[in-house]
Amino acid sequence: MPKAPSEPIQQPVYIVTGGAGFIGSNLVAELMRRHPDAHIYVVDDFRTGSYANIVEACERAGVGPFTGTVMPDDIAELNWQPAIEGLQPRAVFHLAAITDTLEFDEKKMLGVNTEPFSDILDACAGAGVPLVYASSGATYGTPPESESRTPFPESAAGVPQNVYGFSKWLMDAELVRHFESCRREGERLPHVVGLRYFNVFGPGEGRKGKMASMVWHLTNQILDGKRPRLFKHGEHERDQVFVDDVVACTLAAAEKGAAPGVYNCGSGRTTSFNQIVEAINEALGTGVEPEYFDMPAEMIATYQHYTCADMSAAAQAFGHRPSWSPMDAMMKYARQIVADRQRLGLPIRIDSVSSGATA
Ligand SMILES: NC(=O)c1ccc[n+]([C@@H]2O[C@H](COP(=O)([O-])OP(=O)(O)OC[C@H]3O[C@@H](n4cnc5c(N)ncnc54)[C@H](O)[C@@H]3O)[C@@H](O)[C@H]2O)c1
C-alpha cells in the first residue's frame, strides 16, 4: 500500500492504475514525455499487465527507462484516502480493470471493476485531485443509433449486453449520483471525467491475447500465412480508435478547465472489418482475401454490429479532437507488427512481405 511520504513531495506526481496494461503503459510513457520531471506511480496487480509493456512503451516513446514507482497491488486492497492525501498527485488515471469481456463471473467482475471505484472517487474528490477513469463503449450495448447507423451520443448508454459493460456503466452511474449530490449541496463538481473508450488498437496490446484488437489479430493471421477470418460478410462497423488518440484524450480530460462528466473516447468514425483487412493488405503489400464464417447463433442478439462515438461533447468539454484516421493508423500499426516480428525473429509466412517493402 502506498505510504504517505515523510518529506513533502517536490516533484509532480501522477498515479496510473492499470499502468502495466496496454493503454496504461502507453499513457505512462506519454506522461514521461510531457512531464520529464514528474514521478509516476503505477498501481497494477499484473493480472493481465506486464513489466514488459512499460519497458517497451518507454522505448517506443524514446523517453528513457521508467524510473517511477510500481505498486504491485490490487486496487481493491489499497487505502486510497491516505494514499491520495499523502502523495497529492496532480492527477489520477484509473484504468485498472478486468478487461476480458468474456469473463462471466459477475461477482468477480463487479468486485474488481466497480467496487473499488467509490473509494478512488471519494479520495480524489475529497482531496481536489483530478481523476480520469476508463469507462467503455460496451456501456451502450446496441442502442437505437446502432440501427440508424448514427454516432452514439453519451445519453444513449445504459443497456450494456455483458457484465463487463455493466461494470463500467455502474461506475458512470455512480459518478452521476456523486454530481447530483454535489449540486444538491451547492458544491462545485469535482474534476472527475469518465471516458468511454471504444475499440482501441495499437502497440502494446499483444499480451492481451484473445482480447487484443481485431487489427492485431487480423494482421497476425495474415503474417502467419492464413486468411483473415471474419464474421459473414465483414460489413459490421466499429469505432476503432488508435491508442495515441486515446492517450491524448485521457490527458486532455485531466487538464485544468476540463468540464467534469462522462464522455466518449473514440475516433468518431466507423471502420468495417473488411476495411481493416484492406488497410492491412495495403500496408503489407498483400492482397489476401478474408475467409468469412457464420457468427455463432448465441452471439447474434447481443453483437455490437455498429458502434460510433459521437465526439462532439469531448471536443466541447476539453478540446479533444481525434487526430488519427483509423485506416492510416492501422497501416502504420500493421507495419510496426511486421517490424516487431522481424526484431523478435518470428517467421513471416507471406512472400510479398519483406523488410524493404514494409519499412
Ligand atoms: N482496449 C480497449 O479497447 C478498451 C475499450 C474500452 C475500455 N477499456 C478500458 O481501458 C482500461 C485499460 O484497458 P487495456 O486495454 O489497457 O487492458 P489491459 O488488460 O491491458 O490493462 C488493464 C490493467 O489493469 C490491471 N488490473 C486489473 N485488475 C486490477 C486490480 N484489481 N488491481 C490492480 N491492477 C489491476 C491489469 O493487470 C492490467 O495491467 C480498462 O479499464 C478497460 O476496461 C479498454
Image: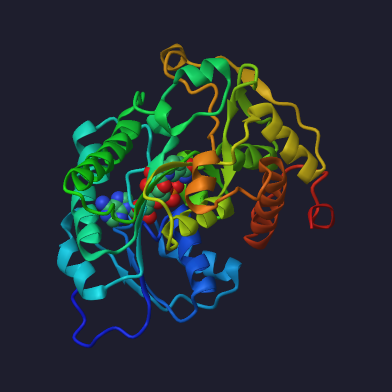
The residue at 49%/75% (across/down) is 35
The residue at 35%/23% (across/down) is 159
Instruction: Please name the colour scheme applied to the rendered image.
Output: rainbow
Residue 119 position in % (x across, y down): 18, 54
Instruction: Classify the position of the C terminus by image quarter.
Output: bottom right
Residue 82 position in % (x across, y down): 15, 68
Above or below — where is 263 with respect to 203? above
Q: Nearer the viewer, residue 231 or 273?
A: 273
The residue at 37%/32% (across/down) is 102
Instruction: Classify the position of the N terminus by image quarter.
Output: bottom left
The residue at 21%/81% (across/down) is 5
With 289 as the anchor, is 292 left or right in this view?
A: left
Residue 3 position in % (x across, y down): 18, 75
Count of labels shown?
A: 0
Q: Nearer the viewer, residue 311 or 327?
A: 311
Above or below — where is 179 with respect to 104? below
Taking the image as drawn, is residue 74 in sight? Answer: no
